[in-house]
Image (cartoon, helix red, strand yellow):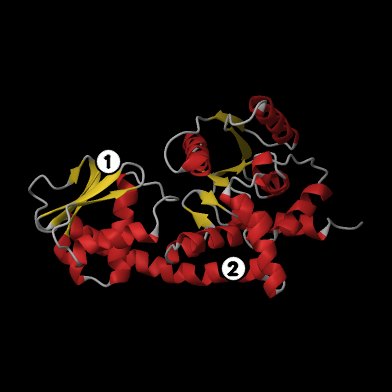
């Protein structure tokens, strides 16, 4: 008797490794849009979880952005139940807020997935991002002029979010979906050139492959992996600097936070290496409400000037309606 198709075996193996690292009693939830990547993930989870003695379910999110989206979400839920996943959850979200529709949809989706994990804790959510998604993320970071953390792409694990398919290319995962007998749905937004990721997927990456030869996606994903270890170390050092800046001079003068954002002492930031200082400033801006997709390296440079090249300028306006003021020896982030 022949075994599964190599693509199916590859996806199942990736999911099996992810499940093996989880503590006993952890529920694994597959996030599934109905697309080929997430359907293959769900199919592999449904196959592997019982063999590993795991409870496995699924979550699908209705963003409400297209006509018939609610019915589509119920159809996806039906497929997940047919695979034997339980529980199967349908979450409806409102897509709004700063940063454009892509960023707003991403925030709403992750909030819904995080809520599902909380409801079924201890639990994790498995995401169907592939090597090609990783390459797209790195290119988008390059286009924004982002730092090493953004260029490090998506982590295989970030808290309760797992991405077991990051080492597999999209063609393999989609072939697995077909071989599993699952009928995928293609989100029209994935083909819409109004969205940056769609343009990267259908225009930028093919152009790079044509100009430089095959293997661009693999090279970008490999670069992300190499940068991630360095970024993790720098982030750890930046945590110490942030703690020092939060409690530095002026912290006892009502400076802990203003308007919902952090307040940082200038002196420890000025004495720190730029690579650490800019990390702390970026995190402070995000904590104050700046959308990550809209906060660019230029914004961080302007924040840095409030520390290293202050000539009396009072504030910097940031995306998301956030403002950073320098008052005496502190930076105050205000929503």
Q: Distance between the residues labelled 1 and 2?
A: 36 Å
Q: Bin the neighbour count of mark 1 within 10 Å (Cα to Cα): few under 14, some 14-19, many 20 and up.
A: some
* Residue 128 in picture, x, y percent from top left: 63, 50
Q: Which of marks 1 and 2 is in front?
A: 1
The percent position of residue 330, horizontal first and vertical second, equals 14, 55
Q: Which of 221 and 290 is in front in this view?
A: 290
Front residue of this view, candidates 243 and 329: 329
| Residue drawn at x 54%, y 68% as measured from the top left | 225
Asked if 148 appears above or below 316 in the picture, the reply is below
Residue that label 2 marks? 220
Residue 193 percent location from the top left of the image: 63, 47
Q: Is residue 139 above or below residue 263?
A: below
Name the image quarter holding residue 139: bottom right
User: How crowded is the residue under tag 2: few (<14 C-alpha within 10 Å), some, or many (20+)?
Assistant: many
Residue for point 48% across, 70% down: 227
Left or right of 96 on screen, residue 239: left
* Position in image of residue 324 (x %, y %): 23, 50
**Residue in the image at 50% along x and 33% along y:** 95
* Disc marking residue 335: 1
């Amino acid at each position: 008797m022949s075994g599964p198709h190599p693509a199916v075996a590859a996806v199942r193996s990736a999911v099996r490794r992810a499940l093996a690292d989880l503590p006993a009693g952890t529920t694994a939830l597959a996030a599934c849009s109905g697309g080929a990547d997430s359907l293959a993930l769900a199919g592999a989870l449904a196959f592997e979880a019982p063999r590993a003695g795991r409870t496995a379910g699924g979550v699908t999110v209705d963003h409400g952005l297209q006509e018939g989206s609610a019915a589509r979400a119920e159809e996806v839920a039906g497929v997940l139940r047919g695979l034997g996943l339980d529980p199967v959850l349908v979450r409806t979200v409102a897509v709004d807020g700063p940063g454009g529709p892509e960023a707003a949809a991403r925030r709403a989706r992750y909030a819904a997935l995080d809520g599902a994990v909380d409801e079924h804790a201890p639990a994790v959510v498995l995401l169907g991002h592939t090597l090609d998604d990783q390459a797209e993320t790195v290119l988008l970071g390059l286009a924004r002029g982002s730092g090493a953390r953004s260029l490090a792409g998506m982590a295989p694990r970030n808290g309760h979010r797992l991405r077991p398919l990051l080492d597999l290319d999209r063609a393999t995962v989609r072939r697995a979906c077909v071989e599993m007998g699952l009928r995928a749905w293609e989100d029209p937004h994935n083909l819409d050139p109004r969205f940056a990721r769609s343009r990267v997927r259908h225009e930028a990456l093919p152009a790079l492959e044509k100009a430089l030869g095959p293997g661009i996606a693999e090279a970008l994903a490999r670069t992300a992996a190499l940068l991630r270890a360095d970024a993790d170390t720098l982030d750890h050092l930046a945590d110490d600097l942030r703690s020092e800046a939060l409690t530095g001079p002026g912290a006892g003068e009502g400076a802990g936070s203003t308007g919902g954002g952090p307040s940082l002492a200038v002196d420890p930031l000025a004495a720190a290496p730029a690579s650490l200082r800019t990390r702390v400033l970026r995190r402070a801006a995000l904590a104050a409400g700046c959308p990550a997709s809209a906060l660019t390296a230029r914004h961080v440079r302007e924040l840095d000037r409030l520390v290293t090249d202050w000539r009396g300028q009072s504030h910097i306006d940031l995306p998301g309606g956030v403002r950073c003021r320098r008052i005496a020896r502190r930076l105050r982030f205000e929503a």
